[in-house]
Image (tube, coloured by chain):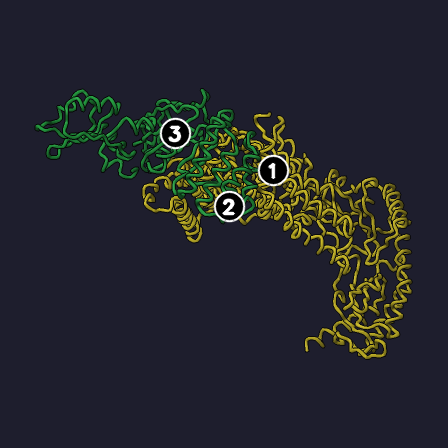
Amino acid sequence: MIEAKNLTKKFGDFTALDNMSCTIPKGCIYGLIGSNGAGKSTFLRTVAGIYCGDHGTVTLDGDAVYNNPIAKSKFVFVPDDLYFLPNSDLFRMAKLYSSIYKTFDYGKFEYLYTVFKLDPTKNITNFSKGMKRQCAIVLALACQTPYIFFDETFDGLDVAVRNLVKTVLYQWVEENGLTVVVSSHALRELEDTCDQLALLYKGGIIFERDIQNLKTSLFKVQIAFEKESGKEVFDGLTVLSYKKQGRVLNAIIRGDREAVTTLLSEKKPLLIEILPLSLEEVFIHEMEALGYKYEIDMEEII
Amino acid sequence: MKELFNKKLYFEGLRQIKLHGFFLTLVSILIAGIAPFWHFVNYMQGRGYDQILNPLKAQWMNVAMMYILPVVFGFALFSYLMKRKSCDFYHAIPVKRQTHVISFALAGATYIVVSMLAVNLFTSAFLALTKTTHFSFGGNVLLFLNTTAGALAIFAAVILAISITGQKFTAFVISCLIVGLPMGLIELFRLGADNVIYSGIFLAENFAPTAVFESMFSYGMEDNFTSLFSTANTFIVAILLFVIACYAFTKRKSELAGNSAQNKYIQYVFQGVIAIPMLALAAALACNGVSSGYKLGTSEMMLIGVMVLVSLIIFVAFEIITKHSAKNIVKSLPVFCIAVAVAVGFGGAMIGTSYYIDNTNIDVNDVKYVEFHSGSVMTGYCPNDYMEAIYQHEFTDSEIIEIVVNGLKKPDRNDTYQGRMYVEIGKSFGRSIERKVYLTDAEMIDVFKKINSLTEYDNLRIEIPKIEDVESFDLALRNTSNDQAEMALIMESFYKEFDLLNNSQKQELLKDARFSSRGIDSVVNNGLTGNTGVNIRTYEYYAMSTYRINVTPLLPKTFDMIVDFNNNINKQELIVLEKVKDGYLHNTELRMSLVKDNKDLLAVGNDTISDGNTEYYFDNDVPIKNVLTLRINSEQLDVVLEIIENAINRHIDYENYVDYAIQTTLADDINEGHRSEFKGTATFTEEEIATLRKIYQDEIIEEQK
C-alpha cells in the first residue's frame, strides 16, 4: 500500500504538491488525472523517491521511500520522458535493468517483447515514440516488482496497443498482484484501464473514487408530470445538478439507481427515464458539485 | 561495505564507458608511441644514443591523459544527472546514492588506472625492447603513480562539480575551478607578495594537476611529476575531494537537473567565483608592483583595467550561457562588486604580508646559518657548474650571514640588484625562516669570494660519486669504447689514484669539472671537456648526475691508459683515412674542432670543409655526381688529410698534451647516414694549425664571395 500524508513539495515559489494525502491500495490500477501542473508527475516522482518532500511523508508498505533501496526495489518508475542508454537495444537495456532489479525475469522479458512484437536487437533510438513506450513497459513489467508507476506512459498509444497494454497489465495484476499507478492529463486515456481514479488540481487531490462505483452511482434522470412541478420532486435525493425544460425536469443524481427509480415512480410521472453518464460527464458534475467550474479548471483533462 | 559498493552497478559502470575507455586508450597508445618511436628512429640514424631518457619525455601522454581521462569518464558516467529523464531513472532505482556514486566512481577509476597503465606499459615495453636508451623504470613508476593520482583527483573534482551543478558547462567550469583555483590563488599570492617564500604543502608543484602550470614559472617540471611527496599529497587531495563529492552527490536534489545551480544564490556564488581568477591576477600584478617598491605605470594600470573588464565579461557570459537569458544581469552586478572586493582583500593580504616580512627585523647575532636554495639567481658569480654544491649547505660564516641579513633590510626589490637568492636563515633558537634576498653586484662578489675562501666549500668541491654508485663511466672522447672491461679498468685506476690525492690536488683536478644534477639528456653532449676527460654518471629514479672530469697527469696511470686508448683508436681509424685519400669514398664530410687547454676554440670545427676528392664516383661502373658542392679543391684536401695523418701518427703523450689538439670526425657517404667512420683526437703543431686555419679562412672568404 502506498500512503502519502500531508505531502508538500515546492520548487522555489511554486507549490507543486500542497499538503496532499492519499492511499493507494494493493492490487489496483490507480489513475491520477490532472491538467498540466496539477502535480501528477511531482507526486509520482516523490512516491518513487526521486524527490524528497518538503513536508509530510510517503511510505510504501510502511517504509519511507527516499534513498531507501528496500522500498525502491518494490517498484519500477516509468517516467513521461523515457530514458534509454545511448545507442542501446532492448537486450542492453535488459542487462541494465537486471543488474539493478534482482527480480528481473528474462523469461517474462522474452514473452513480453514477443507479445509487443518488438525486435530486441534493434537500436531503440530508431524506434517510434509509441514503440519506445512499449519498450519501457516491457522492461518495467519484466522487473516483476509489486508496484509500477507510469507517468503519462499510455498517452498517445494507439487503440490496438493500448488494448494490448491493458490486457497485459490485467494479466500481471491477476497473476502477480501488481499495483499500478498511472497518471495522465486526459481522462479518456485511463477510463477503460483504471480501477480507481484520483483527480489532482493545484497540487492536491480533489477527489478519488472507485471507477465502477463512480460510473454507476451518478446518473441522469429525465422526468415529466402532468401538473407543473419543480425541484421538490427530487427531495430526499442527492442532486448534483438540476435543470427544467418546459415540463421536463432534468437532474443528475447520486445514489442507488433502482432505489431512485422506485422512489420517483411512486410519484406517478408521465415520463421517467434514467440515463447513464459518460465518465467525462460524471467528472464534470462531481467537479461542479465541489465548486469547480468545468470550463475554466477542467477543460484540459476532459 | 555491501551497502557502499554494488558489484553489479560497478560492472554496469564499466560497460557504460567501455567504448570511451577502449577508444581513448587505443588513441593514447598510438600517440604515446610517437615519443619512443622517434627516439628509436634517432637511434637508428646514429643520433640521440647514450642518453638517459627522462620518464616525462617518454610518457608525456600520461600527463595529457591525466587531464583527458577523468573529464571524459566523469562526464560519461555521471552526466545523467544533467538531464531530467536520466536523472529520474537513476534516482528511482533501488540503490542508495552513496552506493551508486562509489560503484560508478570505482568503475571510472578502474578505467583511469587501466588506461594509464596500458599506455605506460606500452611505452616502457617499447623502450625496454628496443634498448635504444637508458630509461629510468623507477622514475617511470613514480611518474605513473603521480599522474594517476592527479587523474583521480581531477575525476573526484568532476564528480563533485557534477553533484553541485545541473548543466555540463557549469560542471566543467566548476571542475576546473575546484582543481586549479586554490593552488592558483597561492601562486598568485606568491607573485603579488614578491618577498614571500612559501614552501609548504599547498603549492602548485605538490599537486599533480597543477604541477604543469607551476612549471611554467619555474624550472624542472620533471621533478614535480616524479615526486613522491607530490604523489602522496595529490592522492590525499583526491580522497578528500571524493569524500566531499560523495556527500554532495547524496544530498543533491534531483530537480537540479538541467539548471545551472540549485538556486539563485548558489548561481551568484558560481558567477562570483568564476570572476575571481582574473581579478586575483589583476590584484597580484598591482600588488607585485607595490610590494616591489615601484609605482605602477600607465601600461600596467591599463593591463589591470583590461583584466577587470575581462573578468566582468566572463561574469556576464557565464550568466548568459547558463541561464540562456540576460534579464538578471543587472540584478547580479552587486555580486561582481563583491568579487572585486574579495580581490581587493586578496591584494590587501598580499601587501600586508609583504609589509610584515619587510618590517620584521632579523638581528645578525640571532642568525646561526644561511642556506642557499635552488632558484637563486647567481649567474656570473659562480666560477663553475660545480658551484651548485653550495645549495642545501649551512654556511655559518659571519660575513656571509651579515651580507645576507643586511640584504633583507632593503626597502625595494627592483632590477638594480644583480642577484636574487632564496635563503633559509636559521636562527640561534632553533627556528628557521625563508626569505628572498636581493643583493648588489658588489655584495654578490663579496659573498662568493667568501664562499670560495672557505674550507667547508673546498670540501664540497672535492666530492665525486662513490665508485659503487657509478652507473656509467666512459671517456669524454669523440670515439669512446663500448668495451666494458676496458672501461672498468680505467675507472678502477681513476678512483684508486683519485683517493691518493690530497685535498688541494683534488681541487686542482676538479677546478674545471662540470657537474649537472639534472638528468635530462641535453647535458650529455654540451661541449668538450678535454682530450682525456671522463664522464661519471649516477642514475637516480629519473635523474642523472653527470660529472665531467679531466684526467690530467695528476692521475698518471689513468692518464696513460686513456692516451693509449685514444692512440689505438686513431691507428685503427687510419684505414678510413687511407680510403679517403685513395678516392674510394664519396660524399665525404670532415668536421674538426680545435681544442686548446681543454677549451673548444671553435676554430675549424663544425663545418663541412670538404667533399670527396673526386667530382664523380662510380657505382657498378655508373658515374654518379657527388651531391655535395665541392667546397675545397682536391689539392687542399690532400694537404688537410696529410696533416691529419701526421698528427694521428704522432700520438698524444704527456709532452704534447698541452699543445693544440683537434678532435676530428671524418664521415663518408653522409647521405646514407654514415657519420662516424672516423673519430679521433690528435695533437698538431703550430705550423699545421696555421695551415688548417688558412684553408678554413680561405673557405669562408670563398663562401662570402
Chain B representation colour: yellow
Asked if both marks, 2 and 1, belong to the same chain, the answer given is: no
For the residue labelled by badge 1, is the local secondary structure a helix, a strand or a loop?
helix
As drawn, the label of residue A30 is 3
| Residue at 62% in and 41% down | B112
Q: Which residue is mark 1?
A: B109
Q: Residues within 10 Å of mark 2 (few under 14, many from 20)?
A: many
Is B83 on the left-hand or right-hand side of B608?
left
Quadrant of the image occupied by residue B212: top right
Asked if both marks, 3 and 1, belong to the same chain, the answer given is: no
Is A80 on the left-hand or right-hand side of B569?
left
**Residue A110 location (% of width, % of height):** 56, 38
Q: Amino acid at mark 1?
A: Ala
Q: Amino acid at mark 3?
A: Tyr
Q: Quadrant of the N terminus of chain B?
A: top right
Q: Quadrant of the C terminus of chain B?
A: bottom right
Tell me if residue A87 comes above or below residue A192 in the rendering: below
Let me know if residue A152 appears in the view.
yes
